[in-house]
Image (tube, rainbow, N blue to C red):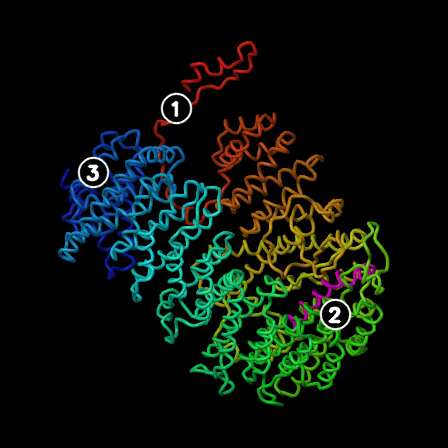
Amino acid sequence: MAEPIRALCDELIKAVNVMMEAESSQTYRLEALKFIEEFKEKSPFCVECGLQLAEKSQTAVVRHFGLQILEHVVKFKWNDMAPQEKLQLKNCTMGLLSDGTHPILQEECHVKDALSRIVVEMIKREWPQHWPDMLKEMEALTAMGDAQTELVMLVLLRLAEDVITFQTLPTQRRRDIQHTLTQNMDSIFTFLLGILQLHVNEYKKMDFIIPGLRMTKAHWRVGVATLNTLAGYIDWVALVHITSDNCHLLEILCLLLSEPELQLEAAECLLIAISRKGKLEERKPFMVLFDEVAMNYILSAAQSSGGIVERRYTFLKRLCQVLCALGSQICSLVGSDFEVQVPLNLDKYMEALFAFTTHPSQLLRSSTQMTWGNLFRHEILSKDAVVGQMAIKYLRAARISLVKTGFPSKNDCPGCEFSRVDFDSDEDFNCSFNSFRAQQGEAVRLACKIVPFEAFQIAREWVQYQICTPIDTGNTTSKTEKGLCSALSLTAVQWDAMTFFTESVLGQLFKILEKEKIPIDEGMELLQMVVNYETRDPLILSCVLTIISSLFPFVTHQPHFLPQVLFKIFPSITFELVEECKAPRTRAVKNLRRHACSSIIRICRDYSDFMLPCFDMMYEHVKKLFSSELLLTQMEKCALMEALILISNQFKDYNKQKAFLKELMAPVTAQWLSEEMKSVLLDPATFLAYVGADQVISDADTEDQMGINRSRISFCVNTILGVVKRARWPANPEEAKAGGFVVSTASDGAPIYRNPCAEPLQALLPNLFALIRTQNNLFLSENINRLSKTFTRVYDIMDVEKNFALGIPQPLLDAYDSSAYRNIAERMQGFFSSLYDNCYHVLGNAGPCMQQDFYAIEGLAEQIVGSAFTHLDSVPDHRLRPLLVMSCPHDYYDSLLNPLLGPLFTYLLQRLNFRWQIINQRTSLCAQEEDEAYEENHVTQEVVEEQLLRLVTREVMDLLSVTCITRKFPELSANKEEVDGDEEMVLMDSSQGIQMNTPSDELSELGKCLLQSEDIYMTLLTICFNSLSWKDTINCQRCASVLCWTLLKQVLGCNLLPDAVTWLYTSVLKGLQMHGQHEGCNAALTQLALFIYESLRPRYNELRFIMNQIPDIHVEALEQFDQKTIQSTVSKAGEKKKREQFKRLIAGTVGKPLGQQFKKEVHIRNLPSLFKKPKPTRDILENTDTAGLITLFSSDHDNC
């Protein structure tokens, strides 16, 4: 027998070497792999060969393979082995543990890991019932040497990972092992701590005498292994084991923070322990870490210097996390019911945290921000004097940390070296820094609440310093103009940081200080200094505008200063680097001009009553600017018009405001209603010719003429949009009534307002509908063919939208030196995209703005259907998304919403079904043709299309949810004075993104109205239940948990067709097959399936027929569950058990992830239960003659 095994082992060694040698051909490697796999599956000599290959005389690769064979035997053949064979393999494995490895420092890590896996696989199958002395045997092994001790640690760690963390075994076996581990946890922890202390002490002693000795390293290796094992248990054991003996474990871990070779593992253990949740009273002992000794060790470790050494840097990251976790614990415990006082060493804790906040590493800085926010926000801690002092230090440190430096591609600061470790690119760093800045801004605002005057002084000093400091462009000057900053110039990033800090502080200052305490004089002095500051650098000037906006509340206390502020802002609206230069403006200049316009709009919006005395002066100035065609872009003109409209809202006189709006809109009205414009807007061919999309562009003059035409259309639409967004009646009902804005009252007594812009806008709407219809017609093939070769791709998705869909961050470097659209085709693409969006935004805002003057338009539903819904089949997915929201009163539901939403939902159902069918077919086709080489652009396009379809699908579900479901939170409205009780109506999509708030499960009034139509109702149900099996996990979970049951339960009492019931239930099971692998989807779909089964099973036997077809269903269990469901005998107390039973019944429908579909199943048999079976329960109170205390406390019950 020995000779054949030896020969077989030689063959296996050759096969392993062929697989591992780099020179082996693919053919030989595949043949070797096939031979090995066949041997493991079919050979009766696996154990013998495995043991022989695992001998110490073999190479590490061969020994590892031998151990893999033994593991394979235990995992897949254990159930078929005789008891004697199992015992023999167990004894051989224990022999390998005791004497089958090289010394601890010589043995390969992968060999140790493979050996420990075999032992764990046997433990999972036999312990504790058939191997009760396992723990004692492990403990005995540790007495044999360092190598055996390390192996025992690996076994215990992997056991905890498999049973608790990964849960890779059946429920009963997991419960048996976990229960036994928990029972023995005291002795396990005592054992682990004993091993740790023994080897750490030996390590320290030997390292002190002779550093670097081999025996010293052996003790260090055991110490590391023990700490790693502790980390695997600390995460889940009862907190009492961690905090016992006055937190002795935590004390040891703190001491180890000073040991360079062990500090990383100690910090990881400490982090896991302190991050534990649980009852506050159980976490109270964690406060021992704020004692003098422990905090000194932590502070010393945090403040110790060290270069960019990987292990040391990783330790700092863990220690930073430890401090943040400590912060969470103290915020939870201080002020709770358990009388935890502010710790005496809070100052040392914050010094340690502050050391990371000022560390060069951007990652470490950002990790602390949330903790600072929690400390500054805490009701008790924020009032402590120590926290107040630290808030000042924190604010001063923010002057450095907010400056955007440390890019991995540069070497201009110490942080760059750390960034190269943490970030793959400058874009990654930039994304992380933006998130960090947002968090730090919140912490700065909270610190400002604690020390408002000090915060203001720090901001004031910083502004003064930057104003007095000469501009330093550094090595990164603008590419277009010499002597100007680029976005990454030293001065630019400092101004940017200072602006953000000042904005954060001042924004908070006016909210928290009483009027008499506001430092008006200092504020006005600072504002004067800013207004007097002169620069021609657009980036710096943009920062100046932000500071002026932040300081503007000071102006309200000294109104005479207002003209100076306005005269400082207005020149930026017309800013040019070179006067009368025809070269394209840089993005920095364009952003500055837009920023100036936004500043004016913001001031007029927030301080419209304060700005009213300056209205005439502003109006005259705007007229003067408008008189020059080239001075302002059309968008800038619209922005200034919006500012004037916002001030005019303070006229509080309907006729005066109406006259002003007519005058303001007169040029637009004349142009929009001209015969030339009507012909352009009505006919797609004329429209394309007018904007120049049918021309091959070669001459710049031709392009200029067509650009003027496009700007005219954009200006008209943008002006209309500005008016509907900004024109409003007074917020005060009395002022509105006195000003002539109230026309009547509703049935509930609420006033009905009229908007002064309604009359001029009504005349413009027919052409707007014509434009919307024409834009949809542009996607027809005959009109696409009219596009010239210059503009063939102008209807494609914008790069910004594409990158958003793909999750690609925007490029950041030198963006301020580039023009907005770099060529003619991109400018044309931007025109079509923005025009399409803005038309829908006009309609969306028309309802809140014009109220009944809009909804009462004759034939409004027909006009919308005839324009917005025209040729939707040709409109691409990325064009279906612009938002159209209307605030529609109840009176117009039947006349307006039903005729709109009925056809819309029907169309969306057809479109989404068709599009998802294409995606599914494409997926299966790719699976069949996976060897074909797809071009990168083609693959990217498919990914974009699929992701856009997901976004559209989610937005359709948002539409359905907003339409039919009453939400628990108030809807955002474009009009602050909107009449209560109005419902939102959405026509196409949602550019506002996904609403993550959970709606309630009640139908809205609009939902009830829609459900009165059977066709609309069935369409809504079909959309919701179909979407459960579309390849979008987020959409599936939201539909299953919110929409499906809310809609379905409305008709449970009706007589549904059996086919409909079958389809509904099958749709849910299909959803489980597609998405059941995801925990959230599984829970939502299982709950939905249970609701349907419980509600409809008593009347529909078809559901039982469906259940019988589920793979691997337990028929007897189904019969019992079925009877309980039909009889409705389950009590409320048994609801959880019922859900678990149902989940097990339908488990066969749950699909597996791709990585698990072809994995060989591991079967672990259950052993005799460790738990006593409960005695049959009986109702003692059933017999009233014997019911009493004596019966209740009888010996029978005592023995239970």
Q: Amino acid at mark 1?
A: Lys
Asked if residue 855 lies in the magenta stretch, the reply is yes
Q: Amino acid at mark 3?
A: Met
Query: Which residue is the site of mark 3?
Result: 94
Q: Secondary structure at mark 2?
A: helix
Q: Secondary structure at mark 3?
A: helix
Residue at mark 1 to residue at mark 3: CA–CA distance: 32 Å
Magenta extent: 831-857
Q: Earlier in the sequence, mark 2 or mark 3?
A: 3
Q: Nearer the viewer, residue 49 or 582?
A: 582
Image depth: mark 2 or mark 1 in front: 2
* Residue at the farthest front position: 516
Query: Which residue is the site of mark 2?
Result: 723
Please rate how many residues cluster around mark 1, counting C-alpha atoms within 10 Å: few if below 14, some from 14 to 19, many from 20.
few
Q: Nearer the viewer, residue 214 or 929?
A: 214
Asked if residue 826 lies in the magenta stretch, the reply is no
Q: Secondary structure at mark 1?
A: loop
x, y percent for residue 603: 66, 71
Residue at mark 2 to residue at mark 3: CA–CA distance: 84 Å
Please rate how many residues cluster around mark 3, counting C-alpha atoms within 10 Å: few if below 14, some from 14 to 19, many from 20.
some
Residue placed at 37% from the left, 62% from the top?
355
Q: Is residue 935 at least partly visible in the picture?
A: no
Query: Which residue is the site of mark 1?
Result: 1172
Q: Is residue 817 at least partly visible in the picture?
A: yes
Residue at mark 2 to residue at mark 1: CA–CA distance: 77 Å
Residue 508's label in the rendered image is: none
Q: Earlier in the sequence, mark 1 or mark 3?
A: 3
